[in-house]
């Protein structure tokens, strides 16, 4: 049975002013007169509580990871970069601690992106937009910018008064100070980003003396500008209009997904409450609008699930604080499901179903992709070889009638240590391997430097063929290095059988 809950606010009687949220008042004032609507400034109020503390802790941890990671050193042999995490476009390598990925292994990066997307789908299906509320870079840097703004201009009411006041020295120095720190944070953000693509200690020296790569200056300038604009000015507009995730998330959610929820079954009918009066015949919501003024998106959670809501939980902290003041239980706004609200409204027991078809599908997909990634890493070889046959001429007949074919072996050493590679050839009987500057034999040994592709010339010589034998014959290069072994199918060409 489907239960419908009326989430509409009762209209006040004629002549009486109804309780209207600040966000609604601002939207009413800023109704568009043309094609586009100007941004309505949002002044989120500082709130204290469990979820605000979690957001502060995650903000500190994630910013620390972002700014510190490029400076973590990781010893590697030879002239390899000693940076733990580095995307080296010039050298076409990606370094992550003990892992080194080459361009040919881009499928690992693809697998990680697919795994991250599936994990995001699963998290959203279970707990709503936790990523948006706690870990999204736009949310993290916006929180940091609002913190700086609050340092210079004060909390919500003080900021509103300052913006409405005429220009004065007090207003000027606060605005200039705020924007100076904003620019400093934005520059630090862009500066930290470029260190992921160059050796950090080297780049920080060349950057300031003007000898760094031009790409570093351009990238730093672009990220400085976007951070300053997105976190300082656009803020909630990035989440509402630019980010596609709010529109995609609807496909991931259902009535069993945990989201920041106003519990209508307990809060309605709402209205102001005077101290000393009873609570009979009314809900716990006192219509104080604290859940609205703390919202960084400027929405009213009591209007139900909305695309703009990022599930940050700040309205929960604000509501819990007000419930403590009026002596009512906490949890009027909480992480809950639509199914639970409907069940309580009908007097049925509440059941939370974390395991359901969509979460099961996502979980299985995460396990499968993770298994494939682990299997791929376990099967990954540090030595890779490509064999290229000479095309002009494809064969050479020597003075004694024997036939020689030439090959170029490109040996890639993806490890961090020198490798000794043994090359054997299996094909026509009696073939002998040789290489410029090396004696011929059944096996050739090459020393290959780490993190390099080493091309080597190899000649395969076969005795004069029997009558009627000619043309290309199947053959195989057998490559081994330590415990690793690889076989490369190729061909040995005898040429014209009637010569």
Image (spheres, rainbow, N blue to C red):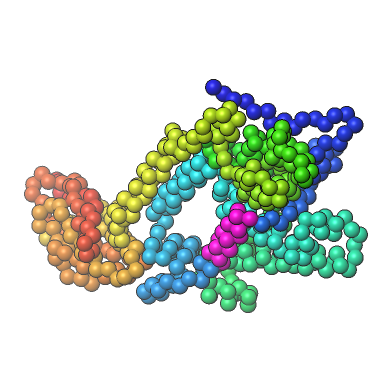
* 353 relative to 106, above or below: above
* 323 relative to 13, above or below: below
List x then y, in percent, for residue 152: 77, 65
Q: In which quarter of the image is residue 403?
A: bottom left
Task: Give the residue displayed 81% in from the left and 56% down from the top.
Answer: 157
Between 141 and 219, the one nearer to me in the picture: 141
* 80 relative to 497, above or below: below
Q: Is residue 256 visible?
A: yes
Between 10 and 395, the one nearer to me in the picture: 10
Is residue 59 a member of the stretch shown in magenta? Answer: yes
Is residue 255 a member of the stretch shown in magenta? Answer: no
Determine whether, in the image, residue 226 is placed left or right of residue 361: right
Task: Give the residue displayed 23% in from the left and 50% down from the top.
Answer: 489
Q: What stretch is highlighted in magenta?
A: 49-67
Between 315 and 102, the one nearer to me in the picture: 315
Q: Can residue 404 be seen in this view?
A: no
Total labels: the figure holds: 0
Task: Give the residue displayed 10% in from the left and 44% down from the top.
Answer: 468
Task: Give the residue displayed 77% in from the left and 44% down from the top.
Answer: 276
* 450 relative to 431, above or below: below
List x then y, in percent, for residue 129: 57, 45
Q: In which quarter of the image is residue 1?
A: top right
List x then y, in percent, for residue 407: 26, 58
Q: In which quarter of the image is residue 359?
A: top left
């Amino acid at each position: 049975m489907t239960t419908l809950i009326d989430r509409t606010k009762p209209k006040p009687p004629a002549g009486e002013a109804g309780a209207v949220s600040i966000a609604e008042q601002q939207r009413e004032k800023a109704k568009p007169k043309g094609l586009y609507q100007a941004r309505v400034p949002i002044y989120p109020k500082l709130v204290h509580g469990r979820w605000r503390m979690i957001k502060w802790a995650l903000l500190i941890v994630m910013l620390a990871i972002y700014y510190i990671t490029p400076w973590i050193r990781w010893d590697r042999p030879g002239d390899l970069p000693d940076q733990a995490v580095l995307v080296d476009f010039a050298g076409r390598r990606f370094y992550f601690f003990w892992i080194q990925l080459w361009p040919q292994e881009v499928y690992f990066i693809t697998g990680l992106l697919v795994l991250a997307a599936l994990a995001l789908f699963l998290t959203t299906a279970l707990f709503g937009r936790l990523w948006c509320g706690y870990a999204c870079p736009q949310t993290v840097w916006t929180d940091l910018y609002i913190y700086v703004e609050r340092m210079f201009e004060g909390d919500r009411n003080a900021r509103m008064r300052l913006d409405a006041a005429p220009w004065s020295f007090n207003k000027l120095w606060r605005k200039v100070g705020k924007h100076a720190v904003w620019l400093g944070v934005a520059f630090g953000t862009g500066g930290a980003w470029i260190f992921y693509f160059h050796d950090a200690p080297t780049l920080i020296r060349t950057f300031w003396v003007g000898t760094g790569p031009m790409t570093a200056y351009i990238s730093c300038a672009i990220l400085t500008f976007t951070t300053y604009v997105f976190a300082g000015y656009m803020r909630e507009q990035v989440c509402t209009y630019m980010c596609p995730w709010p529109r995609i998330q609807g496909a991931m959610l259902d009535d069993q997904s945990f989201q920041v929820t106003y519990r209508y079954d307990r809060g309605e009918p709402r209205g102001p409450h005077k101290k000393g009066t009873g609570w009979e015949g009314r809900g716990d919501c006192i219509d104080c609008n604290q859940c609205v003024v703390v919202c960084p998106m400027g929405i009213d959670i009591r209007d139900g699930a909305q695309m703009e809501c990022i599930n940050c939980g700040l309205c929960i902290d604000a509501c819990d604080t007000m419930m403590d003041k009026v002596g009512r239980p906490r949890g009027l706004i909480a992480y809950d499901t639509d199914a639970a609200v409907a069940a309580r409204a009908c007097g049925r027991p509440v059941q939370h179903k974390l395991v359901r078809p969509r979460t099961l599908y996502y979980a299985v997909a995460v396990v499968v992709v993770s298994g494939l990634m682990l299997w791929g890493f376990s099967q990954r070889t540090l030595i890779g070889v490509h064999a290229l046959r000479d095309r002009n001429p494809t064969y050479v007949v020597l003075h004694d009638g024997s036939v020689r074919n030439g090959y170029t072996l490109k040996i890639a050493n993806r490890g961090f240590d020198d490798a000794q590679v043994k090359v054997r050839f299996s094909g026509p009987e009696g073939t002998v391997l040789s290489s410029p500057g090396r004696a011929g034999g059944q096996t050739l040994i090459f020393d290959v430097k780490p993190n390099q592709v080493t091309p080597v010339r190899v000649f395969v010589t076969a005795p004069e063929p029997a009558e009627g034998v000619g043309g290309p014959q199947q053959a195989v290069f057998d490559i081994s290095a330590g415990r690793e072994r690889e076989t490369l199918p190729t061909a040995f060409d005898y040429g014209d059988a009637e010569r």
